[in-house]
Amino acid sequence: MKIRYFPDTDTLYIALAERDSSSSQAINDNLIVDFDAQGRPVGVTLEHYSEISDSSAIETLLPIPSALQPA
């Protein structure tokens, strides 16, 4: 997964997969979901991000691989 913020357009894009998008669906004025040819979501666009977000930072929480967890 990749997350990119574009300050010039105040857009946050979350790439869920490396597959190409073949269609998009606007859920509302601020939310667009991209789908691959099989209808699986591949990305999410949040328009006007600073207006809809309560946070000034983007935080990610990632699982720790089992090989790195204490025994």
Image (cartoon, rainbow, N blue to C red):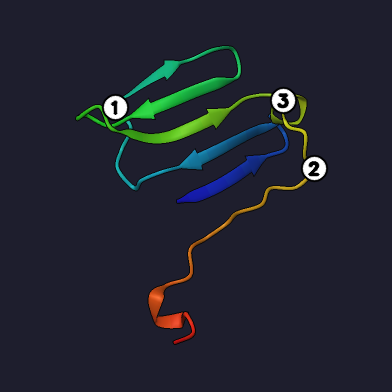
In the picture, residue 4 is in which quadrant?
top right
Instruction: Check whether the beta carbons of the residues at disc 3 and disc 2 lie within 8 A of each other.
Output: no
Q: Residue furthest left?
A: 38
Q: CA distance from mark 3 to mark 2?
A: 11 Å
Q: Which residue position is annotated with label 3?
A: 52
Check whether the beta carbons of the residues at disc 3 and disc 1 lie within 8 A of each other: no
Dot in front, 2 or 1 = 2
Q: Residue 47 location in percent, x, y?
A: 63, 24
Inter-mark Cα distance, 3 to 1: 27 Å
Q: Could you say which quadrant of the image residue 60 lies in? A: bottom right
Q: Percent position (x, y) of residue 21? A: 33, 32
19 or 31: nearer the viewer: 31
> Residue at left 60%, top 19%?
30
Q: Position of residue 2 (x, y in %)?
A: 49, 50
Residue 44 at x, y percent in the picture = 48, 32
Secondary structure under tag 1 reads loop
> What residue type is disc 1 on?
Ser
Q: CA distance from mark 2 to mark 1?
A: 32 Å
Which comes sooner in the sequence, label 2 or label 1? 1
Relative horizontal placement of residue 61, taking residue 55 as reference (left or right): left
What residue does disc 2 label?
Answer: 56
**Taking 59 as reference, is 64 left or right?**
left
* Label of residue 57 in the image: none
Q: Nearer the viewer, mark 3 or mark 1?
A: 3
Q: Residues within 10 Å of mark 1 (few under 14, many from 20)?
A: few
Q: Residues within 10 Å of mark 3 (few under 14, many from 20)?
A: few
- Image label count: 3
* Residue 71 vs residue 5, the one in the foreground: 71
> Looking at the rendering, which quadrant does residue 16 occupy?
top left
Q: Residue flagged by tag 3: what amino acid is it?
A: Ile
Q: Amino acid at mark 2?
A: Ser
The numbered mark at residue 22 is: 1
